[in-house]
Amino acid sequence: MAGSETSDKSGLQQVDWSALPHGGDLFGEMQLASEAVPSSTTGTLPALWPGLAMCGVGAAAAAWLSDHYGFPIILLGLLVGLSLNFVSQDLRTHRGLDFAARTCLRIGIVVLGFQVTIAQIVALGLAPFGALLVVMAVTFAAGMVGARLGGQSRYAGMLAGGATAICGASAALALYGVIGKDRLSQAQFALTLVGISLASAFAMSVYPALAGELGLNHGQAGFLIGASIHDVAQAIGGGYAFSDAAGSYATIVKLARVALLAPVVALVSLTIGQAGAAADQPLWRRLAMPWFIVAFLVTVVVNSTIVVPAMISHAALIASKALLLLAVTATAMRSRMDLLLQMGWRAAVPVVTATLASFATSLGFALLLI
């Protein structure tokens, strides 16, 4: 790290980006750089505040733009965060941005469990649920194939395929918590998030119209939209754009996908091991799911066994969206635009192949089963 830091006139240390090694591992660079933060900033709130404040401003701007212009809020959080990524060159922002990208993410996923119940999954029916499992498996496999075609690592395929198969950005964040920065660069992760958000926004606008042109009935359109659109809000919005009946069915299908977040993350963790774990760790350790996935399951069970007041459920939904928005914005702030540009179009291939496979498979089952 020698020569990678300089001091300005105020005595604050700044990062010399050109001198940092291993350009692909952005979080690794930041970790090394943050070790030089003066001891006076190691207190909890003082250390977190600069990064959290900047992340909060960016997230608030994204929320305002989404509310006034109707653009997907997660995509706006990514774009605003990328436009503000220069703030991460100041070492004082690192701890707060890390807290938002990791802790806020995990809490947001736990709170998301209040939107899902076991009864909703049962109401889907055995055949549609089995079809949904096949759609998700094909989508995941397509992400892996797309990664190979695009010259990307298998971890990029897992991230793109899993996020497309389950619930978009929130699933991508959960999966990246298992994959880890040492296996997949922050630049690839940010680009995957951008691709998923763009694909979801495109699908919400186009799929209802395609369903109408294909002459699908309400149930068929609801299954197609709920099984193939990535993010929860876009899937539900796309369903109701077709009809109220299609919107209700799309909501059930989509929430069933969200409920499968925990099993998919657990399978990925079992296959590759949790981030930072030793290669020779015993099987029982590999079977252990991340704590926030366990907490998500507990929340789903609680929400299924007791009647949660509508006011609390609505507040939990808002809190989950806010926390995930903070996590996405912080992640974008920690990403370097030059690394994103260096990756080229091939890095987006896994998202494209997974999206196309999801649509084609969902349409096939919608025509056959409903």
Image: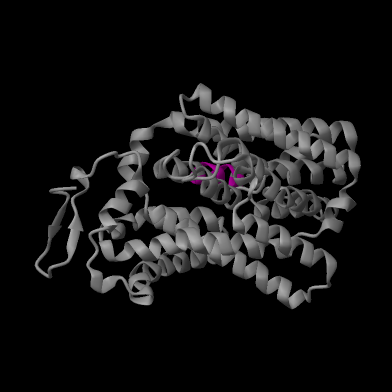
Q: Is residue 82 left or right of residue 290?
A: left
Q: Can residue 341 be seen?
A: yes
Q: Is residue 312 left or right of residue 279?
A: right
> What range of the chain is rendered magenta?
193-201
Q: Is residue 115 above or below residue 369?
A: below
Q: Quadrant of residue 208?
A: top right
Please identify the residue farthest to the left as the structure is shown: 9
Residue 56, how many percent across, how many down? 43, 69
Q: Is residue 221 left or right of residue 360?
A: right
Residue 96, how many percent across, how many down? 38, 66
Residue 172, how many percent across, how many down? 56, 47
Q: Residue at x 75, y 61 (%)?
A: 300
Q: Quadrant of residue 318?
A: bottom right
The answer to if 16 sits in the magenta stretch is: no
Q: Is residue 306 above or below residue 183?
A: below
Residue 151, how many percent across, how many down? 46, 24
Secondary structure mostly seen in magenta is helix
Of residues 360 and 164, the one nearer the viewer is 164
Q: For the C terminus, which image quadrant?
A: top right
Q: Is residue 10 left or right of residue 148?
A: left
Q: How is the image coloured?
A: one colour
The answer to if 199 sits in the magenta stretch is: yes
Q: Residue at x 60, y 49 (%)?
A: 171
